[in-house]
Image (cartoon, grey):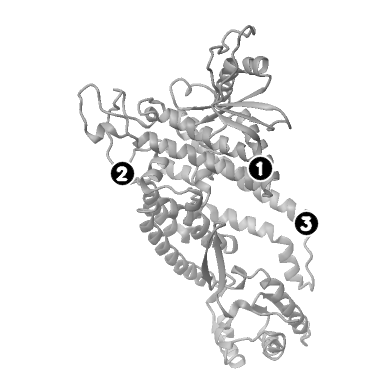
Amino acid sequence: MYLSNTYGLPAKLFISDGNSHDTLLSKEGTTQGDTTAMPMYACGLMPLANSLRNIENSLDDELFQILYADDAGGGGTLAIIEKWWSKVKEKGPGYGYYPEPSKSWLVVKEDKQERAKELFPDVNITTVGHRYLGSFIGSEDGMKEWVKNEVKTWVEEIEQLSDIARNEPQLAYSAYTIGLSKKWNYLLRTTPGIATELEPIEKAIREKFLPAITGQPFIPDTLRSIMALPTRMGGLGVENPCHMADLEYQNSLKATEELQKAIQKQDVEYIPNPETEKAIALSIKTGKANYHKECREKIVQSIKPREARNLDLLSEKGASTWLTCLPLESLKLTLNRQEFFDSISARYDLPLVGQPRATQCVCGEENSIDHSMSCKRGGFVAVRHDCVRDFLTAELDKVCYDTKAEPHLLEVRRAKLPPGTITEDGARLDIRTRGFWGPMDCTYFDVRVFNPRAQSNETQDIPQTYIKHEEGKKKNYLHRILEVEKASFTPLVMSTTGGLGQEFSRTLKQLATKKSRKTGYTYQECIRYLRVRLSFSMVRSITCSIRGYRGKNKNDGSSSDLYHTY
């Protein structure tokens, strides 16, 4: 039996869509592609660490050592460190650990530098400090200079990503939130007092990256604050690193408090308490949520009521799902440059950029984004509805039986139904299926997609708006379905911003449960998939409404494309 260190060669990372795959060669270390890397290191390092403890020293010479993966570090007086280093070189190769003096650094005070050179002739020596495990050990000036160099590199990467964003804003946004921003997030957690040094990053984000992914020439203060909020609160999740530095560092101290004590005591074993860790994690999560909540409340107090209501709409569950998923072509989750710009403009009520649009719609109304969501010219209101209906029909057909789109209802004949019930022959609902709520139950669904920013809705409380539309559907069809069809009826109400009514949410959860049982995927994976697909259906319908062809202007007979497109 033996262990092989895969660090010697780049690790292969496989990216697959289920049908085919691509391979990336990772040189970031074995942990990037080898899940057995850390146990492998532990097998070799624990015996080595124990042997290094047996160093003769006086009571005043206390040794502190830390071994993490292939990095070994020791702290103490020069005398004890000299003994420790000699033993590392002696014992290390026997455990598969080969120290390299040319890559090793000793951080000492200035008055100890000459003595250090005598004791460690083959090791790099500095009085300023040096990088260690992604952070810095040394003087404050040395730390700030090192951070400055790191920040300079990250600013260059932000600028490169901004260049990409001008053609592929969705791809650049995803790369930033999932990848690039994590680089300095680790620094925030491990290095104190660096908020001021991070200002060049924030400047690059605000002046280059955000304009590149939104198409807007300038990002005002309030909009920048909104975009710094998590997507679940209506933002973009593009945080200001200067504002997060102190909070992230304090959270890191709290999360590693027990580990710090174990290191300081040089305990041979550290066995974390799951309950304690869970409580700390919850405390950190709650504290961060409260911080963002306070930021959001300050924003709401500084903006107009209509803008505050829009922020509430964007904070609904499902309203921002399209922003948080990977832009995978295989799942048709990609948007082109114009579609992404238009989606962001519609999200924050910003001026549209890109292709020119007429100032007046072909129906004669002002050509605004809100009007685009409600204008029936061009059939885009119906298309929006049909996208949701067709997606749900396809998903229901996979987990239920006898699923049909737009089924005709039975004739009412002599049935006595309440006023307001639609009784005409030939009436149809959107979807019928069997086995959804119960094994043999027949269920009818009817979809309604409404614009919450329309004049008929914008003065109402948001939850009440969903209830109003659900009650309207029930008034029209519930009693007919119960009395004539002997089935159940569920209205599915969705807003153009991506929010769902209570009945729709309950239906989606039941659909995810049935899909999980059918496919073997977890419930979380299934509900995530359904929300993403619904969210993208709505985003595409919005961009289609904004730019879609609506016909000629009947007033002047013009055939100009400016009148044809929105």
Real-space CA distance between mark 2 and mark 1, rounded to the nearest whole angstrom: 40 Å
Residue displayed at 34% across by 30% down: 368
Inter-mark Cα distance, 1 to 3: 32 Å
**Residue pictured at 51% horizontal, 40% vertical:** 535
Q: Is residue 76 visible?
A: yes
Position of residue 68 in the picture relative to residue 192 (left or right):
right
Disc assigned to residue 393: none
Q: Residue at x 57, y 55 (%)?
A: 246
Residue highlighted by disc 1: 515
Question: Which image quarter is the C terminus in?
Answer: top left
Q: Is residue 76 above or below residue 237?
A: below
Give the residue type that dot 2 points to.
Gly
User: Which mark is first along the chain, 3 or 2?
Assistant: 3
> Which class describes the residues within 10 Å of circle 2: few (<14), some (14-19), or many (20+)?
few
Secondary structure of the residue carrying tag 3 is: helix
Residue 549: x %, y % from top left: 32, 33
Upstream in sequence: badge 2 or badge 1: 2
Q: What amino acid type is highlighted by mark number 1?
A: Lys
| Pair 2/1: label in front | 1
Given residues 387 and 249, the one toward you in this image is: 387
Please indicate, yes or no, whether residue 304 appears anywhere in the rendered image.
Answer: no
Q: Which residue is mark 2?
A: 354
The residue labelled by disc 3 is 274
